[in-house]
Amino acid sequence: MWSRRGVLAGLLGAPVLLLAACNDGGGGQKASAPKTSAAKITVTPVDGTANAAFTAPVQVAVESGTLGSVKVADAAGQEIAGRLAPDGTSWASTAPLSSGTRYTVAAVASDRDKLQADANTSFTTAAPANTFVGYFTPEDGSTVGVGMPVSITFNTPVTDRKAVQQAITVVADPGVEVVGHWYSSTRLDFRPEQYWAAGTKVTLKLRLKDVQGAKGVYGTQSKDVDFTIGRSQTSVADLSADTLTVTTDGQVTATYKVIGGAPEHRTWAGKMVISEQYQQTKMDSATVGLGDEYNIPDVPHAQRLTASGTFIHGNYWSAASAFGNANTSHGCIALRDVKGAGDPGTDGAKFYRSSMVGDVVEVRNSGDRTVDPANGLSDWNLSWADWKAGSAL
C-alpha cells in the first residue's frame, strides 16, 4: 500500500538522478582545444597603412611555413601580379601599383603539419606630391588632314624620356609604323614616314599615370584619344610663279594667284601644316617683333602655318594686280579676298572652305631657308632617318 508521502519522496528524488547523468562521472574523455598553425604571415605595407608608397612592391613573408596563395586586388577586383619565391616563404608584387588606390591582401600559408594560417589586410597608396600632364593635339573625335602629327607638350621638363615615351603609343588602322621624336624636354611628336592615308583611324594611347618623368614627378593621365584622317589634300605655294596649287585625292582641284613674302620678309620654305583656322582675326606686327609695320583687325580667312606667325590668309588691302605678280607680304601667303570675309566666291574664301586642320601647305622657291621642323607642326621637313634618331626608344 503506498502513501502520499511516498509519492512526494519519489518526485524529490528525480532531480538527483538527472544531475548525476549530466555530470557523466562514468569515465568519459574531456574535449581538447583545436591546434593552431605555426605559420606566421607578415604583409608589407602593414594593415591600415594610409599613405603607402605606390612605387614600392607589396611583400608577403611567412615564418615556420610556406605560402599557398597570395591575392592583391584593388576595389574593382583588378589583381596585381606577383612572384612566389622558389622556397615558398615569400611573395612580391611584380606589377606597378596605382597611386591613391585602396588594395586588399589575402594570403594563405601552411605549416609542416599542413595546418593553415591566413592574413587579410588592406592599405591605401599615397597620391604623388608632384605631377605632370601632356597637352595633346589633335583633339579627341576630330577629323584632320593627312599631314597632322600627334604633338604632345608637357607642362614640366621630362628627364626620363624613355620611360615617358614607352608609356605613349600611337596606332593606326590601316597599320603603319609610327615613331616618336623629341624636340625638347617638353615636346614629343609622333608621325609615320609618309603622310597618313585618307580615312585612317588613329588612336593615341596615353598611359602616363604614375610614370616618373623626372625625379619625384609622376604622370596622371591614362586615356585614349581617337581621331580620323579625312580626304587627302596638299597644296604647293610656288613663290617664283606666285601660285598656289591644290591637290585633292590625287587630282589638282584648284590653282590660285597669291602674294608671298617680300625680299626683306621672305616666307619660310618647306612643308607646313595648318594648325588653326579663323574666319577673321587680328594681325599685329608688334606680336611678331616687327614693330608697328601693320595692325589689321579683320584679316579674313586666316589659317596658321607656324607658331612664329606665318599664315595663309585672305587679303583685301592689296591691289588685284599684285596677286600672281608680286611678293610684298611680311612672310605670309595671301589670296585675294574682301573685307568682312563675306564673299564666298573669293579665292581666300574658297581655299579656306576647302581646307581643314592638318592639311599640308608646301612652300617652294621662296628664297628663304627651310622652316624649323619644331616651328608649328612642320615635322615633315625631317627625313625619316633624322626623325627616328630623335626617338628615346
Image (cartoon, grey):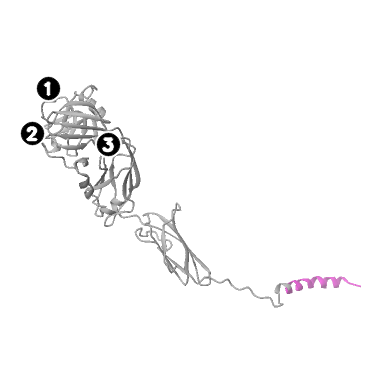
Identify the magenta region. Answer: 1-20
Per the image, is 4 magenta? yes
First in sequence: mark 1 or mark 3?
3
Q: CA distance from mark 1 to mark 3?
A: 33 Å
Residue 203, image x, y percentages: 33, 42
Q: Which residue in the rendered view is the most extreme toward the front?
A: 250
The numbered mark, 2 or 3, whose residue comes first in the sequence reads 3
Dot 2 corresponds to which residue? 263
Residue 143, by quadrant, is: top left
Name above or below for residue 61 compared with residue 131.
below
Amino acid carrying label 2: it is Pro
Label 1 Cα neighbours within 10 Å, binned few <14 / some 14-19 / many ≥20 = few
Residue 393, image x, y percentages = 27, 52
Q: Residue furthest left?
A: 264
Q: Which residue in the structure is indicated by mark 3?
A: 146
Quadrant of the image containing the N terminus = bottom right
The reply to whether discs 2 and 1 touch (Cβ–Cβ < 8 Å) is no
- Badge 2 element: helix
Task: Give the mark toward the camera: 2 or 3.
Answer: 3
Q: Is residue 87 above or below residue 151?
A: below
* Residue reaching furthest to the right: 1
Q: What is the number of the mark on residue 321? A: 1
Whether 215 is drawn above or below 368: the answer is: below
